[in-house]
Amino acid sequence: MHIMEGYLPLIWCIFWYLASIPFVVYGVLRIKKIFDEHPEQKMILAVSGAFIFILSSLKMPSVTGSSSHPTGTGLGAILFGPFVTAALSVIVLIFQALLLAHGGITTLGANEFSMGIAGPIAGWLAFKGLRMAKLGMAPSVFVATVLADWMTYVVTASELSLAYPGANIFNTWLTFMGVYAITQIPLAIAEGILIVIFFDFLVSNRPKMIESLLKEHILPGTRRSVQ
Amino acid sequence: MKISKPLLYALGFLILIGLLALPFILNPNAGFGGSDDQGSAAIGRISPGYTPWFTWFWQPPAETESFLFAVQASIGAVVIGYFIGYTRGRKAAGKAEE
C-alpha cells in the first residue's frame, strides 16, 4: 500500500507528516507508560509489533492478478489502541523506506497515516463497537482485523486521489480503489483468519492479560484458574 | 457438535492456503505485480509526464531486496514463536499467568 518515494507532491508530504506526527508522539509516550507501569505487557506489545513486521513483509497474490501485503496492525489496534499501533507501524515503515526502497521518506507521513493510523483507528472502533453490541470475540476480532487492513488501502487510494485529482476526483478515486482496495479484499480476509486463530490462543493462555488490556471480562464467573 | 480446537485451527489455515492458491486458479496468466507499482503507473496515466521529485540514494538489487524482506519476516516470526513457546512452556510447568 506504500506510496513510492517521490510520488507525492511536496505539499502533501508535509501535510501527511503533520497529520501523523501527533499520533506517533502520543503513541511513543503510551509505550513508555506501558514499560513503566505494566512491564508484564511488554512481551505482548512486542508480539503486536512482530505481526506488523511479518505480515507487512509478505507480498501475497490476490484474485485480481496483482500482489499486495497485509498490514498486521489489527492485533495491536485491538489490544493497545491506535496510538501505540501508530508508533509500532512507523518502525516498519522506516525500515522498509531506508533499507528496501519500499515506500519512502518523503511519503512516510502519508504511508504512516494510512497504515499506522487510519487502519488501526477503523479496526479499534469496529472492535469496541462490536463488543459493545455483544458480538462474540472471534467475529469481533475478525471484522476489526479485516477493517484495519482494508481501510489502510482505502485511505492510500484517497491520499493519491487528493494529490492527483485528475479531471474528476471521484473517477480518480475509483481508479486508485481498483488498484489498491480490490486487490486487498482477499488478503484482508486471510489476515483476519490468522489473527482470529492467534487471538484465540491468547484468550486461552493469557486470559488475565487480555482482560486487563481489553478492560472487559471475557471469561465471566466460571473461569478456570490458569494452571 | 463440538469441533476440537486443533481441528478448527487446521481448518482456518486450510482456508488461508486456499485464499492464497485461488488467484493462480482464477488468473493463471496474471503477472501478480505489486499494487504499489500499479499505483505509480496509475499516477502516470492521470498526470502524464509526472516524474518522482525525490529518489532515495539506495535501491537494493532484487536478490538483496528479497533477502531484506525475509529478514523482516523472520524478525517477526522469531518474536511470535518465542512468545508462543514461552507461554506454552509456562503453562506446562504449571506456573500461573503473571
Image (cartoon, rainbow, N blue to C red):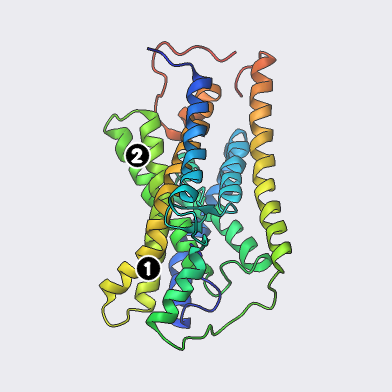
Quarter-of-image position of residue A35: top right
- Quick one: A38 or A225, which is closer to the camera? A225
Q: Which mark is residue A176?
A: 1
Q: Is residue A166 left or right of residue A1?
A: left
Image depth: mark 2 or mark 1 in front: 1
- Residue bearing mark 2: A128
The local secondary structure at tag 1 comes to helix
Q: Distance between the residues labelled 2 and 1?
A: 30 Å
- From this view, report whether residue B25 is shown above or below residue B61: above
Residue B45 lies, in percent from the top left, at 40, 80
Estimate the x, y position of residue A75 in percent, counting from the top left. 49, 41
Under mark 2, the amino acid is Lys
Q: Is residue A8 visible?
A: yes
Give the x, y percent position of residue B38: 47, 69
Q: What residue type is disc 1 on?
A: Phe
Q: Quadrant of residue A126?
A: top left
- B53 vs A218, left or right, is right
Q: Name the residue nearer the viewer: A45 or A51.
A: A51
Q: Residue at x 66, y 42 (%)?
A: B77
Mark positioned earlier in the residue sequence (2 or 1)? 2
Q: Residue at x 51, y 53 (%)?
A: A61
What chain does mark 1 sit on?
A
Callouts 2 and 1 on one subunit: yes
Label 1 neighbourhood size at 10 Å, few (<14), some (14-19), many (20+)? Answer: many
Q: Residue A223 has which mark?
A: none
Furthest residue in direction front, as rendered: B29
Assign the N terminus of chain B to one quadrant of the image: top left
**Is residue A36 at least partly visible in the picture?**
no
Query: In which quadrant will I find the C terminus of chain B?
Result: top right
What residue is shown at x 41% (from left), y 24% (from top)?
A: A218
A61 or A7, nearer to the observer? A61
Q: Is mark 2 on a helix, strand or loop?
A: helix
